Every structure is written in C-alpha cells, then in structure tokens.
Amino acid sequence: MKYNFIRPILLIATALLVKSLVTNLCMVFGMQPESAESIGFIAMIIAALIVYTRIAKKRRQ
C-alpha cells in the first residue's frame, strides 16, 4: 500500500488559504484584527473538515 503525499498537502494548503482569505476579508470590512483572526481560524477548521470528509469519502469508494 503506497502513501499519497498529495492529500495532506492539499488539506493543509486549503485550510491555510481559507484562513488567510477570511481573515483579510473581515479586516477589509473593518473588523478588529483579533476578531478577524478568530473567525479565520473557525473558517479554517470548517474548511479542513469539509476537505477531509471529501477525501475520506473518495478513498472508501
């Protein structure tokens, strides 16, 4: 059984990209940096869970 290195890299890249995008978008709309970071972190967790469930679902099939 060989290990696929692309899946974890894709998961991490997606999570960090979503966090950066949401944080910057919140700050553009005038939110405080601490609050924007918190919302970005929550969005990162949600994005990581969505990507992980899609990867796991494809692996089962």
Image (cartoon, helix red, strand yellow):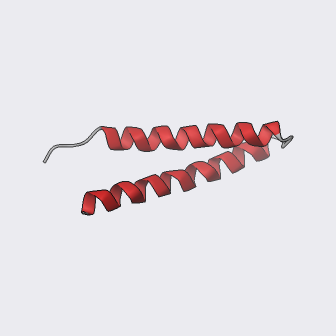
Quadrant in the picture for the C terminus: bottom left
Give the left or right position of residue 52, taking residue 39 as reference. Answer: left
Q: In the image as oriented, which residue stretches furthest toward the left?
A: 1
| Quadrant position of residue 2 | top left
The number of callouts visible is 0
Q: Position of residue 33 (x, y in %)?
A: 79, 39
Q: Position of residue 6 (x, y in %)?
A: 32, 38
| Observer-nearest of 11 and 34 | 11
Task: Indicate whether 6 appears above or below 60.
Answer: above
**Residue 36 visible in the snapshot:** yes
Give the left or right position of residue 14, taking residue 53 as reference. Answer: right
Image point (77%, 43%), residue name: 26
Give the left or right position of residue 48, taking residue 21 as reference. Answer: left
Image point (25%, 42%), residue name: 4
Give the left or right position of residue 32, taking residue 39 as reference. Answer: right
Image point (47%, 37%), residue name: 13
Q: Position of residue 5 (x, y in %)?
A: 29, 38
**Residue 33 visible in the snapshot:** no
Q: Position of residue 12 (x, y in %)?
A: 46, 41
Task: Indicate whether 31 appears above or below 59.
Answer: above
